[in-house]
Each structure stands twice: as structure tokens, then as C-alpha cells.
Amino acid sequence: MATTQIEIFSEAPAAPPARPRVLLMGTALATAAATMVILALVALYSQMRADVIAGGKTWLPEKADLQLIPGNMGLATLVMSLVTVAWIAYSLRNDDRVHSLLAFGLSLLLGAAYINMVVFGWQQLGLGINDSPQALMIYTITGLHVAMTGVGLAFLGVMAFRALGGQLTGRAAEGMNAAVLYWYMTVGAYAVVWYAITITK
Amino acid sequence: MTVTEAPRAADDEVVAAPSPPPAPTGLAAWVGSGDPRTIGRLFVGTSLVFLLVSGVAGALVGFEQFPSDSKTIMGADTVVRVTTLHATAGLFLGVLPLLIGLAIAVVPLQVGASTVAFPRASAAAYWTWLVSGGIVLLSYAVDGGPYGSDRTAVGMYVLGLIAVLVALVIATVSVVTTVLALRAPGMGLRRAPLFTWSMLVGGTVWILTLPVLAAMLLLTYVDLNYGQQFLGGSGGIWNHVAWAFWQPTVYVFAVPALGVIADVVPVFARRRHQRHSGAMVLLGLAAALGFGAWVQLGATVDGKTPAPWLHGGVWITVGYISVVPVLGLLGLWTATLFKGRPRLGTPLVLSLFAGLLVLAGVAGGIATVVGALDLVNTTWMTAQAEVVLIGALLAGLAGVTFWAPKLYGRLVPDWLMRLAGTLIFIGAAATAVGFGVAGFLDQARFTNGGISAVASGDVSAVEGLDLVAALGLTVVVVGALLAAVALLARGTRDPGDDPWDGHTLEWTTSSPPPIGNFASVPAITSEAPLYDSRYAPRDDATDAEGSA
């Protein structure tokens, strides 16, 4: 019996070499594509705003109430999440399940808080989506970023559960690194949106 | 008796390796496949079908201009819609997926990978693209598409095209990741085959460009459904899509076509590619110059359509220097052919035709940016886009013919594909002359008024030129049909592993490749490992004689 087992193992093909950073590379490219969508819309928004201001008018309609607080709190929330997602990746690299779960829960909470903040900002804005081009652009850009954030949370969730289920842990925690990369770009994209919409008004 | 005391035969059964499940056959083998070769073949086959639709639509538009005072086949408003169908199907359902399909099948073989980076994502991308492409075509049938009057159907077009773009980006991400992460040991990026390299640089720019187009489409969709305030409703959609067909954006879609030519030429010259690194730089430059997401009309809240980039310094500069990488590559290919011992195989013939067309298109861009000629928004730009994209189609067919042993396990009938390529080249030339000269006579793009912008004295001449262009597009359609027949024809020859005496890694494996592509991958020591093993000793001897 032992002899047979040795023969089986000796005839088995060699294990394929580890696929280096495939998921990370693919995620980086997909993240770049997603970021271009947001940046394209922000660029158009900024161009339209500059045209209007150059014509001697104010950009936002009079009844618009674009408050700083929801935007600032949204950014602060996402900046805090940068720490918690890095904490997930760090914990998984060290096979620390308790801290991974804790950091993952906090990240989910911060992501949900950000989405809540954006929705609150929409309610305070005082404009309907079909009231003016400005409102349509604001709702489209921020709505798209909320969708991007939702994808990021789902990505983090899938990778966290795969890791906690025993895959992609330790030094091969590539999946979570990929999700973290996507999250960082999501936060970076929000910083641009925040500056273009909330700060410049 | 207990289970542990089972007879000897039972022990043997336990030891025996389980037999693999039977491979799916028929439709299940196609639908459920994550095999890059299968996905690539699906992309190539269905893109040819969409190209036929595009070609017929383009020919109909051309014929409809003759005579210009009566629309015999379609109404005037339908002509405009069919023009957008021709362009949309030609690029996003035709040329682009043809090249991506070729890359999905060939790039893993060229880099020594067992499969493409994300095989299931690639398969999902194909099926998404196919269904969304069908939705785009269907939207035209129910009064949708740009300039359509049914808002729901117009929305179908926009969402369908967004899904098409998402699918193409996913497939491109898969290919580019394969190049970046799955190369064989020893294959640094500088040793990557030129088609692979062109997919890396061109694909990266696609990944940065197509999402911008998707963003504009998303905005038009929201605008369409919430007030149609500032993007012009269904007619305005095309204003925000058309930049993808203008220079410099249209050039980047031809970059992998240049990569195909760059891999075909040295094999048929039986000579190493002259200045491989230089060719890489030129391909990279072509891709970088083709990043044209900034060339958009933009939008203003007062409904005017600004075009700040028109005749701007950057746009003019890019128009001039875009010809440099293409000219440089043609120079390198000419040198390779002169220094080698060329044989005129069908892939080389198709490649040369393709190279000339792409050069003509890019050189035509110089005239476009000369303000005094006033060719912007005329059919000169239509001709330019047609020539570049038909050139890319021809290069794609050259690639399919060249790599047919790996894709299909057989050779494509030589004479049939050569005839198809010749017809496509002649048709493209006639189309370019027709629409191009008509543009010089002030014929506006068909979405901007067409022949109505022409001075009365030139109308009959422009009608004749449009007829020439329409006949040209008809010949292109016939050529594409013959190419499809050639791909469907059963080859009689066993191609062997390496029927062309290839230079790169894909020719070391069987035709078609086994699952996993390679039994073992040799260490890569140059950009043309097979060439080295076959010709390098002789080249060394020749060089030594020359020195003596």
C-alpha cells in the first residue's frame, strides 16, 4: 500500500507555480477603470462650472443648500476607514482572526455611515434631480460614488470571508490586499469629488 | 466481516485514480467554457457577424446619397440613425472584440501561461458583450439608438452600449493582467512578443478610455430620463459618443493591429525583428498618443456645444506626431523584410495591406488638423476612421490566419483568405477616396447634414464619390463574408506545431494546444527563442563572414 502511494505521488504532475499577484494586478486595472468613470464626470462638472462662472453667474442655483458638514464628515469617515481596512489586511497576514473580524466590522460600519451621510446630504440639498443640470450632475456623481463604495464593501466582504474561511491567508493574503487597494482608490476618488463639489461649490 | 477486511480487489479500487468527468460536448462545451481558445474563437466569430451588419449599414448610407434629392431606401432621419449603427457596430461590436478575442486566445500562449488570467471573467465578458450587443442592435429596430424617437428604446441603446463597454474592459483587464503577471520565467517585459506588448500598452489605454465613454453614456442616460436638460436628448447622445471615432482616440484601437503585423513580418522575413526594443517604444508611443478621452465636446448648461479642443495646440500637435510611430514601425518592417529572405505568405500580405491602411488613416489626420483645409466635421474624418478601423480589421484577420493552427487546429484556406483580404483592401481604398474627396468638397458627416452642406455645383460630383464609397464598403462586406467562409472551411492539412517557422513561444506547443497549453515551458533567453534555436548559429556565421 505504501509503495502504491509513493508511485501515485511520483507520477502526479508538479504543482503549478504560484500565480503572482494576478488578483492584485487585475484589481488595480479594474480600479483604474472605475476611477476614470468618476474622474471623467468630475472633469465635466468642473468644466461646466468654470463656463458658468466665466459668464458672470453663480454656479449653484439660489435654492440649493449644499452644506459642508455632510461632505466633510463623509470624507472624515472614509479616511478613518483607510485605517480599518489596512488593519484587516495586517491582521490576516498575521493570521489574527479576532482582529480581522473586528476591523472588518468597523470597516463595514464606516462604509455604511458614509453612505448614510451622502443620503443625508441629498436630503439637505434642496434640489430635485431634474431641477437643473447642476443638480443632475451632483446626483449622478455622488450616486455613482455611492455605488462604487457599495462594490468596495462587497469586495471587502467577499475577500474577508474567503480569508477567514481559510483561503488567501498569511503571506498569500493577496485577495484582501486587492480589496484594500480598491478601497483606497474609492476614498481617493471621493476626495476629488468632495473638493470639486462640496468645497468649490 | 468488517469493511476494513474487504477483499484485495476492493483495496485496488480505492487506490485507483478517479476517472475525470466526461468533457462537455455540443452547446454546453461552448456556453460553459472558460478555455481561452474557445472564448477567443467565440469573440472572433461573432465579431465578424457584427462587422457584416456594420458594413451593410455603411453601404446603405452611401447608396442612399445617390441621388441626393430622393431617399429611396430609407428616410432622411433613418439615414442618420443607420450611420450611427454602422459606426457603433463596426468599432464596439466588430474590430475591438475581434482583436480582444485574438488576444485572449494568443497572449497566454505567447507568454507561456497555462491560461488567461481570469478565464471565467473572460467568459462572462464574452456573454455580456454578446447579449448587450444584441440589445444595442435591437434598440435600432424599435426606433432607438441615437436620434431615435422612442425614449425607452434610446435608453436601451445607451444601457446596452455601457454593458458592451464594461464587458470589453473586463476582457481587456484579463489580457493585460496575463501579460503583467503570468509571463514565463525569463520573459521580462522587454522580451515579450510584440503583439503581447501591443495589447499591454494599447489595452491599458483602452482601460483608461472606454470608462470615460461609459461615464458620458451614463450621464446622457440620466439626462434623458430626468428632463433632457442639457445633453440634447437622443440626438445629443451621438455628440458624446462620436469622439471615440475621431483622432486621436481611433488610433489607439489600431495599436494591437500594429502588434499583429510586428509579429507576422519577422516570421515571413525569416529574420529577427529589427530593433525589437525600438518597436516596443514606437508601439508605446502610438498607444500614449491615442489616449483621446480629453477630446470631447463637453457640455454647457445653456445647451451650446463647445469644442475647446478643435484646432487647439495639443490636438494639432498630436495630429502631426501620431504619424511618427506608424512610420517608424513601417520602416522597421521594411528593414526586416529587406534583410531577411521574405516569403509572401497570406498573413504577410494581409499585414502589409493593414499597415498601409493604418498609415493612410494616421497620415490623413495631418490634413484634418490643418485649419485652412477646414476638414473637421466633414466626411474626410469619416474616411479617416473607416481606413484606420478597416486596417485594424485586416490586421485582425492576418492574426487569425497566422495563429489559426493554435485557434482552430488547422490552417485557413490560403487563397480564400488572400482573396478576402485583397477585396477588403480594395474596398477600403475606394471608401477612403469616396468619402475623403467628398469631405474636401465640404460634405458634412452624415450625422451633421451630409451632402446638404455641399455647394450646388459640386453636388453631382459628391454623389458620384458617395457611390464609389458605397461600392467600396460593399466590396469590404463581400471580403469580410469570404473571410468568415474561410474560417468556417474545413482545412485539409495537418498544420503541425509550427507551420510558419515561428519565432515565439506559442509555436513550441501543439496545434491546437492542450489544456494547460504547455507540458513544460523552456527558460526564455530572448524575445525570439525559437528563432534563436533555428537561425542564430547561421546568422552568427554570416556576420563572421561579413566581418572577414
Image: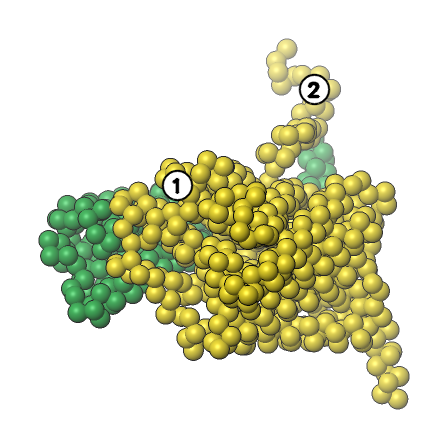
Chain colours: A green, B yellow
Q: Mark 2 = which residue?
A: B10
Side of A53 relative to B336 (left or right)? left
Report the front residue among B435 and B76.
B76
Using a 10 Å C-alpha cutoff, classify the residue at mark 1 as few (fewer than 14 neighbours), some (14 to 19) or many (20 or more): some
- Quadrant location of the N terminus of chain A in the rendered image: top right
Could you say where residue B383 lies in the image, as x and y percent from the top left? 58, 62
Considering only vertical position in the picture, is B62 above or below B23? below
Element carrying mark 1: loop
Amino acid carrying label 1: it is: Ser
Q: Residue at x 59, y 40 (%)?
A: B34
**Rendered residue at 48%/58% (across/down):** B452
Q: Earlier in the sequence, mark 2 or mark 1?
A: 2
Is A151 drawn above or below residue B243 in the view shown?
above
Q: Callout 1: residue from which chain? A: B
The image shows residue A97, relative to residue A32, as above or below, that is above
> Which subunit holds the residue at mark 2?
B
> What count of labels does the image hold?
2
Please name the residue shown 79% across and 54% down the image: B418
**Residue to which mark 1 is pinned:** B149
Residue B351, x across and y down, in percent:
72, 62
